[in-house]
Amino acid sequence: MQASIHSVEQHGQRFSKALVENFSHALTEAGVALSPDLDYDVPYEALEGVQRLDAIVHLKDDPGTVVAIECKLSAFPRDVRDALWQLDEYARSLEKQSGAKVIKALLAERLSPGARDALRHRGVAFYDASGTLFFRHGPVTIDIHREPEPEKRSKAGSPFVGAREQVVHALLAFGGDGFTGQELAQKAQTSPYTVSQTLQVLQQHGWIEGEAAGRNAHRRLVAPGALLDAWAESWRSRKETRSTWFFFANNQKLLPNQVASRLLNAGRNDWAYTGAAAGNALSPFLTSVDRLQMIVPPGATSDVAAAAKLSRAEQGSNVTVVERRGASDLFRRPLPESNIPAASPFIIYLDLLKDERGRNKELAQELRQRVLKI
């Protein structure tokens, strides 16, 4: 199957003939007989006038069926919906014209996991540069899975950094309620511009739906679990300033209360508990917790440790102090039946997953089910 490898402009995307050729080669290797003819930039009559399809591949053993192809550099769930509209229009046009059957296919340099799931659920063929291939025709199903290539975008494009992470936190706190950009900016304690930039990224992944622009446009979180899972994955890998300390307590069950009492008596309210002690207070699950984790502002560790009378300990520690600002400051509240400040349940959940000691992972799942309800 010989065709020159070059790119042409198509619907604002760089459409690669090499990608189509690789898809065709992968199908041939999997035992699907194809015609040597490849048609590119195919015009067809759609409801909105003449449109163009990226490519068509013909099946040698089934002349009455064609593989209709749309190509993208990268594809997220929102891109899947756009491509399916194009493929549906082509299928409608071809079936009306000749009665031919259409196998729809989306090819991309990179398909996100969400895009792959959406396509597989709809029975749409797909292929990406990692070698992942899904194709179904009659009784034949080909399903080759390989991990997606890393996203080629800067860290600044991630929704889980800086003020953008505050937007994610506020968005999860909204739950399933609709919101405007202005409302979300107030809740996230950040600018409408930051909210707009963050929502663009989240909408690419299909995690939110609604009007795409305007500070009064209403949107809604439709995939809180997927968003929380992605945040947790980013949270686990981040580096942060943390130190370990020791506090002498006659009874380890009183450790949180005794440390908190010293800090509050010293007039310090710039800290919050997180991790196992806080999680177990919100969603009782463990019989006892012998370690304490707290969040303090950057640069405040020494002062907080002095106020609580903590001793530095590389080994045998029972208190961990983490320096953070931003998303960790949002939505703090006292632990049940006390005045002890604690981080948001979302931050506590993330910290439990990051610290895999003991039964933290099980406690995290209890917290997610009973408190976060996601």
Image: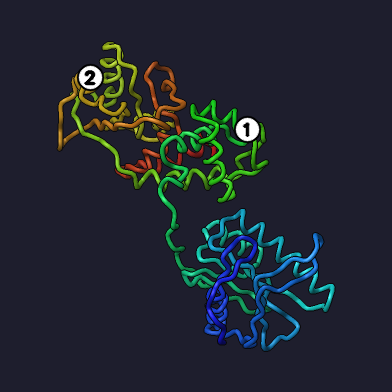
In front of the other: 54 or 334: 54
Q: Earlier in the sequence, mark 1 or mark 2?
A: 1
In which quarter of the view is residue 2 placed? bottom right
Question: SS of the residue at dot 1?
Answer: loop
Residue linked to disc 2: 308
Residue located beneath label 1 in the image: 215
> Which amino acid is tagged 1?
Arg
Q: How is the image coloured?
A: rainbow
* Residue 54: mark in rendering: none
Q: Identify the image quadrant of residue 73.
A: bottom right
The number of callouts visible is 2
What x and y, as percent, mark residue 147?
45, 64
Please name the residue shown 67% across and 42% down the image.
210
Where is residue 285? Give x, y as percent. Answer: 41, 35
Near-viewer residue (13 or 28) = 13
Q: Position of residue 86 (x, y in %)?
A: 71, 63
Q: Describe the element under mark 2 as helix, strand or loop.
A: helix
Q: Is 370 rendered above or below residue 256?
A: below
Residue 162 point in image, percent of width and height: 41, 37
Q: Amino acid at mark 2?
A: Ala
